[in-house]
Amino acid sequence: MRRRRFLALGAGIAALSAGGTLLSGCSAPAALPRVSLLSPGSGEPQWAAIAHALAHALPAEGLARRVEVVLPVGRPEEVVRRVLTAAPGRPGELRWLIIGLRVLAGLEAEGEGALLATAAPLARLVGEREVLVVPASSRLRDFAAFADALRRTPDGLRVAGGPAGGAEHLLFGMIAQGIGVDARRIYYAAHASAREAAAAVLDGRAAAAIGPLRQWRRRLAARDARALAVSSADPVAGLEAPSLRECGVRVDYSDWCGLIGPAGAVGGELAAEVCDRLGGAPAWERACRAAGWNMIHLAGDEFRRWLTAESARVRTVLRDLGLLKHPNTICWGSCESGP
């Protein structure tokens, strides 16, 4: 259930150094004076697009007066570390970070997952379902055949996907866990992008691939490839494939992104209210529909609890993949960097 927290008059409002604009009588909630949106995903161009969409939607809905998008240089994990441990910014300015599964996994792999526990979780925004695919001519007719092959020879079934330790690698590890296979033995071919991973499976360099559903829809519709399973809890409309849960793998999984801020920032209560209201903001809903983003909005304490559970899940998978204690390895065990 979405919460509605209206700020009290008097001392509660005075505590906001820059404050929002108050209207007399029955008024709309105050707007944030200034927000800097930092998108640290150097390898995640979608995050920058999300930041720019938010920069339009927040002022359009009267949730913030001014929003600036900043694209910091450096590894995402380093950017997050700098922002969360830095001194407060300019008076009246809130700094929000766009983070996602990749950053969470990177911090956990480097032993710094606790850093997120010191942050202020604001909102989970959107998520991308992942799909397990094979070439149209593959002998693996369904997920059961894939699972049987993986159980027989875990290191003999090459599966292509994005970067090591990323969304696809984690999902492959979860699939292995779900069917009783030692995740350290699986053969994962890491690629710089979903496009490269798709090329690897379509030209026969990999037996299967895991990638964002949105990027596979055209090839699936053209019958160039077949989907064996989708990472959602339930089947996806228009997709001829079962969910992983229907296949006996208890996984509900998205490559998600969301917003966090430094803990204890002045104006945090109003920021939480704004992020709560963002989930039902028409301008944001229109932006998500236009871009094809799947809204999975979750705010406040519910997001905090979810992020805690997600961190634990990611940490467990990284450990089982052999990546948790080896943060600097590009590939570990039966993982390789694809050409």
Image (cartoon, grey):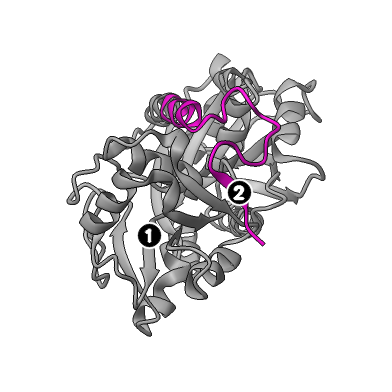
Q: Nearer the viewer, residue 225 or 18?
A: 225
Q: Is residue 93 visible?
A: no
Left or right of residue 248: residue 189: right
Q: Identify whether 197 is placed above or below 65.
A: below
Tell me the crowding category of disc 1: few under 14, some 14 to 19, or many 20 or more residues within 10 angstroms, Cα based.
many
Question: Mark 1 = which residue?
Answer: 131
Residue type at mark 1 is Val
Farthest top residue in view: 11
Q: Position of residue 31 (x, y in %)?
A: 58, 41
Quick check: is 301 in the magenta stretch? no
Classify the position of the N terminus by image quarter. top left
Left or right of residue 226: residue 314: right
Question: Mark 2 = which residue?
Answer: 336
Q: Position of residue 175 (x, y in %)?
A: 34, 43
Q: Secondary structure at mark 2?
A: strand
Q: Earlier in the sequence, mark 1 or mark 2?
A: 1
Q: Nearer the viewer, residue 259 or 21?
A: 259
How much space separates mark 1 and mark 2, taking CA atoms?
A: 20 Å
The residue shown at (63%, 21%) is 112
Q: Identify whether 323 is placed above or below 279.
A: above
* Circle 1 or circle 2, nearest the eye: 2
Q: Is residue 42 visible?
A: yes
* Magenta stretch, residue numbers: 311-339
